[in-house]
Amino acid sequence: MSNEIKERHHHSNFAFWIISVMHDNPLLPIFRNPYKLLEAAGLKPGQKVLEVGCGPGFFTIPAAKIVGKEGTIYAVDVHPLAIKKVQKKVEKEGIKNVTPILANASNTGLPDRSVDLAFLFGLFCSFKAATRVQIPLGAAKYGESGKVMSI
Ligand SMILES: C[S@@+](CC[C@H](N)C(=O)[O-])C[C@H]1O[C@@H](n2cnc3c(N)ncnc32)[C@H](O)[C@@H]1O
């Protein structure tokens, strides 16, 4: 784990807990329907998709269901608790097409052209984090059909 990742980890366990409580609220999908948002972002069956800052996985499971067995979701987060939580959710649901990755979005370790689409939601809670991910997303080389969306 890089020093940068360690540093963020130490500063944000409590913040992550708050985010988890909010995002796992069963009423949240009524107001923020993940399927509608992901379909609007262009997710389709069979795609390989990078999710930047997956957090507790509010979008990860719906994204995995949309891309289906032929697709893959690379769920990246800098926070170890996020990756642990996503791993747990994926196992509980018996989902096989999610690869959780503990990494900073600035260096996911994924090879060039390995995704068709990347999305990120909810990272503007930290302007610094958003700035960090915009640069690598803009610079990354995606496939011919590659698209990047940010909100
Ligand atoms: C507010 S949460 C949003 C979670 C999810 N995207 C959603 O909207 O439900 C932001 C997440 O982004 C992660 N994050 C922030 N900066 C990041 C970076 N540079 N690389 C990877 N993950 C990052 C945080 O650890 C946190 O889990």
Image (cartoon, grey):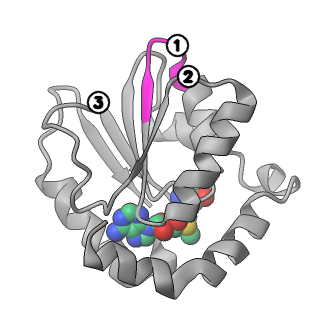
Q: What label does residue 69 carry, if any? A: 1
Q: What label does residue 116 carry, if any? A: 3
User: Residue at label 2?
Assistant: 96
Q: Where is residue 105 in the image (x, y as percent from the top left)?
A: 30, 60
Front residue of 30 and 80: 80
For ligand 1, tell me if the residue under mark 2 lies within 8 Å. Answer: no
Q: Which region is colored magenta?
A: 66-73
Q: Position of residue 100 (x, y in %)?
A: 46, 43
Whole-angstrom CA distance, mark 1 to mark 3, is 15 Å
Q: Of tags 2 and 1, which is closer to the observer?
A: 2
Q: Are marks 3 and 2 in contact (CB under 8 Å)?
A: no
Disc 3 secondary structure class: loop
Vertical placement of residue 111 versus 58, above or below = above
Disc 1 residue type (three-letter): Lys
Which of the 4 image quarters holds residue 28?
A: bottom right
Q: How crowded is mark 1: few (under 14 residues within 10 Å), some or many (20 or more)?
A: some
Q: Which residue lies furthest to the front in this view?
A: 1
Is 68 one of the magenta-colored residues?
Answer: yes
Total number of numbered discs in the rendering: 3
Whole-angstrom CA distance, mark 2 to mark 1, is 8 Å
Q: How crowded is mark 2: few (under 14 residues within 10 Å), some or many (20 or more)?
A: few
Disc 3 residue type (three-letter): Asp
Q: How crowded is mark 3: few (under 14 residues within 10 Å), some or many (20 or more)?
A: some
